[in-house]
Amino acid sequence: MNTIQLIGLAAGMLTTIAFLPQVLKTWKSRSAKDLSLGMFSMFCLGVALWLAYGILVRDIPVIAANLLTLMLASTLLFFKLRFKE
């Protein structure tokens, strides 16, 4: 791996991990009332498209970051739909 790929992996890791506290808080509180359904729906679609792009251009940092981000953001979207209040 070269320096550019390492920077990409570090950036992807940090922006992906940023979702973890929100996922844990939402899971523990069983409340997603303050999360925007529209925002998370569009965000998940955008991340899915970035993941598809990463796969098509075979860019490991883009694939890894967007795969993990999609998993975390989709979890929040699931919680939003599941924890009705």
Image: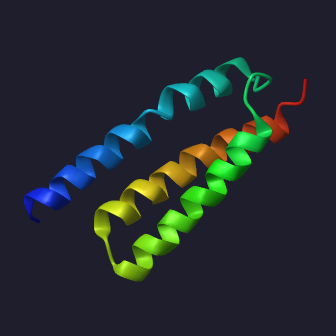
Describe residue 79's horizontal placement relative to residue 57 as left or right: right
| Residue shown at the point (34%, 48%) measured from the top left | 12
**Residue 33 placed where, x, y %?**
80, 23
Q: Is residue 56 above or below residue 75?
A: below
Query: Which corner quadrant holds the N terminus?
Result: bottom left
Q: Residue furthest left?
A: 2
Is 83 rendered above or below residue 65?
above
x and y percentages locating residue 24 in the rendered image: 57, 27
| Nearest the eye: 69 or 29 | 69
Q: Name the residue at 73% across, 49% down.
A: 41
Residue with the most extreme right position: 85
- Here the colouring is rainbow
Quarter of the image with the C terminus is top right
Seen at 70% across and 18% down, the residue is 29
Residue 39 percent coordinates (x, y): 70, 41
Taking 71 as reference, is 5 above or below it?
below
Q: Nearer the viewer, residue 64 or 42?
A: 42
Residue 4 appears left or right of 53: left
As drawn, is 6 to the left or to the right of 51? left
Q: Which quarter of the picture shows residue 64?
A: bottom left
Relative image position of residue 81 (x, y in whole percent): 83, 41
- Image quadrant assignment for residue 38: top right
Q: Residue at x 65, y 59 (%)?
A: 45
